[in-house]
Amino acid sequence: MLRRVGSTLRLARTALVRAMRTDDWPAVRAIYALGIATRVATLEQKPPSWREWDASHLPDHRWVAEADGRVVGWAALAYPHRTIPPGVAESSVYVHPRSQRRGIGTVLLRHLVERSEAAGLWTLEARIVEGNVASLRLHVRCGFRVVGTRDRIGRLDGAWRNVLLLERRSTRVGA
């Protein structure tokens, strides 16, 4: 169950979604590192520094899910490739393994979509490592569709990996 409480969202009375603060970075970085460790969440080898992450993500589109006073997930929009026009951004969603399968990823991604449309963005992109079934299902459930595959785009643990390209076009903005 989801309800709005001021500028935050509350999920099943146990988690709330709020704007990410700078002091959330250690928890966000730790959750990202756990995603990297799965070997299906990203082709990244290690989490970036705060400076690198901050420079690549839109300041007004960074959200965390908090439960029992702890950050249990995060979602953010990144600046896309420089040739892509304004109105397009790339999404990321990560949930701590102990908090997965509770709807937190869905609430985070839906919030990200809602806020991006309110800001005038008409397309969200996602890149999902082939084999990350949970992320693919989450994105499809939230209105994304597969638009292509980058074959053998990167190596991870000595093996070439494919990345699925997804997009979500707003039906409210730029329609």
Image (tube, rainbow, N blue to C red):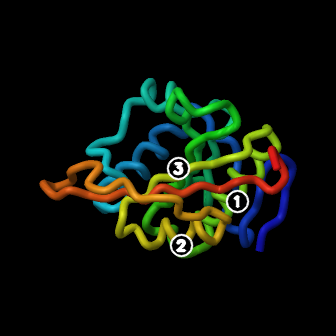
Q: Is residue 100 left or right of residue 153?
A: right
Residue 137, numbered label: 2
Of residues 152 and 47, the one nearer the viewer is 152
Task: Identify the residue shown where x is 50% and y is 37%.
Answer: 25
The amino acid beneath tag 2 is Arg
Of residues 69 and 46, the one nearer the viewer is 46
Residue 99, numbered label: none
- Counting the numbered discs, the total is 3
Say whether marks 3 and 2 touch (CB < 8 Å). Answer: no
Task: Identify the residue shown where x is 35% and y is 49%.
Answer: 33
Q: Tell me the crowding category of disc 1: few under 14, some 14 to 19, or many 20 or more residues within 10 angstroms, Cα based.
A: some
The amino acid beneath tag 1 is Arg
CA–CA distance in space, label 2 to label 1? 13 Å
CA–CA distance in space, label 3 to label 1? 12 Å
Say whether marks 2 and 1 touch (CB < 8 Å). Answer: no
Relative to 103, is 117 above or below?
above
Relative to 46, is 96 above or below?
below
Q: Where residue 69 sits in the image (x, y, percent)?
A: 61, 54
CA–CA distance in space, label 3 to label 2? 14 Å
Q: Where residue 1 sits in the image (x, y, percent)?
A: 77, 74
Q: Is residue 14 left or right of residue 84?
A: right
Q: Is residue 136 left or right of residue 89?
A: left
Q: Tell me the crowding category of disc 2: few under 14, some 14 to 19, or many 20 or more residues within 10 angstroms, Cα based.
A: few
Q: Is residue 23 visible?
A: no
Quarter of the image for residue 26 reads top left
Q: Identify the residue under disc 3.
A: 92
Earlier residue among tags 3 and 2: 3
Earlier residue among tags 2 and 1: 1
The amino acid beneath tag 3 is Ser
Q: Where residue 95 sits in the image (x, y, percent)?
A: 50, 60
Label 1: which secondary element: helix
Q: Identify the residue under disc 1.
A: 110
